[in-house]
Every structure is written in structure tokens, then in C-alpha cells.
Amino acid sequence: MTQRDPHRCAFEARCTRRELLEDEHVGAQIVDGVVCDGCLTKLRYAVKGMPADWERLHHGMGERFIAGGAKVSGTHEHALVINEHREALQAHIVDLADRAAEMVETALNINGRQRHGRMGFPAHDKATVEHAVNILEPNLDVLLAQPEQDMLVWGRIPDGDEGWHPRNGQPREFQSFDGVGIAAQIVHASRLVYQELGRAALRHSDPMPCPAVNHKGEQCGAYTVGRWDGTAEYDCTTCGARWPEREYQWLQGLVIDLIKEQEETDLLKFLLAEAYSRLDEISNLVKKADSDPAIDLPGAGRVVAESIQGVLNNGLVPHQTPKERQTVKGPKK
């Protein structure tokens, strides 16, 4: 069973506001819920866009038979599609949509066709995706809360004549999925569609973090702000916020000021934590010396002073004098 930090976004390294902690990418810190607001918005857009993604892949797949040519009467099979990769991605979207809908339907006690708990797979059609979107859109929190459960998936295609199922052909096997894992795959599949077909228009990205603030007073902070080619409006593809060009330029200045302020605050927090750590160590040394009878022996004071000096010299930066800490020169007298 996957163990996740309840205080961080469950999308972990795929989080839109991920942080670098000890050379490892982790999800953003959250107060409640399962994922951060940015990832939840991104998941909502990905779910809502699944029918459009399916349609784009369908139109970009190619002809299934030779137009105007005579069909072979001895077979009912379609001709090979031009782009098998797009067909596989299309089938993957339908499969993910159906699995997610099944999780939510089971949790809400909705009677539906529970295909993955039995044998068989959903038909690769747009109706399955549209049905799933209707179930998922108002119940994303239910999907994210689902624990791991076994689902039937296609197994690896055997290399030779052995390993094939006597009735179904390609072998099948059970794998464990939870709601967060399925949700992360839905977001990733949406990205794969853009990688496969490209964007409908050129997008100019901005290097600044998104300045939008939600109703809780939390900044989006995702690095997904940009402007579509031919428009004068900036938007964030994570939270959906939009700004006119002049307003966004003004907000950029505020963001720069906030970044500088945050850097100063982080530095002050670090220095305060380091000061408290040194004071705690000195306090422990004083308590230990006070209860030690050897404190009255000659030379004991020097030993205590050297111990305190050692504490002050610990850390990345040794303890500085007031003159060394002075960063702004006073007026000349």
C-alpha cells in the first residue's frame, strides 16, 4: 500500500507547486484535503477535457479503410489505422475514465456496469468518456479519497507461442490502483494528448509564478502563466485566473516584491532558529556545569568558556559581533 505524507500534495513529484527537499521533489504543503488547490484545478480541467481529447485523437488518427476502394468480402476486420499510437492513447483515456467512474460509482453506491471487477473491458467509444465525466466532475474529492483496489488490466504480450490465454488471447492480470493514482494518470494522459497532437495555438510562457490568490488567501504560485499568440490577455492554466496585459505587468512588480519579502522572511526564520538552537545548547551547558562539583575547581571557568565558544562557532556561519552584523552604514560624524 502506498504511504503518502498527509501534509503534502499527494501528486508528489507531479505537483504543480512541488518543492525540492533534500534533493528530492515533494508535493506542496497542504492544510487539508488530498492534493493542493493547483493540482485539483488541473485535475478538474483534465477530466472536463477528456471528451475533447478523445475527439482530437479520433480526428487525427487517419482512415480505417481505403476511401473508394473495394472491401474484401472474406473478412469483417477494419484496415490498419494510420497511427496506432494515437489509437492506443485514445483507448487509454477511455480506460482511465471508466476506471475512475467505477471507483466513484462504487463509493456512492450507484448501480452501474462494474466491468473491471469482473471480466471484460469498456468499449473504446466517446459515450463511455462522456458518462465518466458526468460522474467525476462533481465528485473529484470522492475519487481522490478512494483506497487501493484490484482491477483487471491487460498483461504483457508474450514473446512466443507460450503464455497466451486459451480463450482471451492476450493474458490479463490484476493490479492495485487507488483514486490518487488514477487521477494522476488522467492528468498525465491529458498532457500526452498535447504532446502527440500539439497545441491549437502558440503559447508564450512567463517565468513568474502565478499571482492569483484563492478564497483562503493562498497564492497559486504555479509556473504556468502565459499568453496565447495573438491575444493581449495573460492566464494561468493551473488555476484559470486571467488578467489584461497592463494589469499583469503591475502584478509582476508585486510578485517580485513578495519574492524579496519572502526571501528576507526565510532568512530571518533561519537566523532565529539558529539563535534558539545555540541558546538551548548554552542553557544545557550551564545546567550541566551548575550541577557538576568540578565547577569550583581551578580552571573550570576556562573549560566552560571554551565550551560556550564552541557552541557559538557551530553552524554554517559562526556567531557574529554587532559590528559584523551591521549591513547599513550609519551617517558619518
Image (cartoon, grey):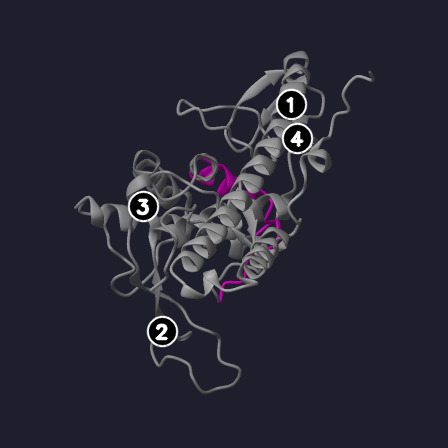
- The verdict on residue 73 being magenta is yes
* Front in this rendered view, residue 158 or 187: 187
Residue at the (62%, 32%) spot, across then down: 264
Res 82 quadrant in image: bottom right
Residue type pointed to by label 4 = Met
Distance between mark 3 and mark 1 Cα atoms: 39 Å
Q: Residues within 10 Å of mark 2 (few under 14, many from 20)?
A: few
| Mark sitting on residue 186 | none
Quickly name the residue at label 1. Answer: 257
Local secondary structure at mark 2 = loop
Q: Residues within 10 Å of mark 1 (few under 14, many from 20)?
A: few
Residue at the (34%, 40%) spot, across then down: 33
Quickly name the residue at label 4. Answer: 208
* Front in this rendered view, residue 319 or 236: 319
Residue type pointed to by label 1 = Asp
In this rendering, the answer to whether 61 lies above or below 232 is below
- Magenta stretch, residue numbers: 47-74
* Front in this rendered view, residue 235 or 11: 11
Res 71 quadrant in image: bottom right
- Of the 4 image quadrants, the one containing the N terminus is bottom left
Distance between mark 3 and mark 2 Cα atoms: 30 Å
Quickly name the residue at label 3. Answer: 143
Comparing marks 4 and 2, which lies closer to the viewer?
4
- Earlier along the polypeptide chain: callout 4 or callout 3? 3
* Residue 76 visible (yes or no): no
| Mark sitting on residue 168 | 2
- Earlier along the polypeptide chain: callout 3 or callout 2? 3
Residue type pointed to by label 2 = Asn
- Earlier along the polypeptide chain: callout 3 or callout 1? 3
In this image, 313 relative to 113: left or right?
Answer: right
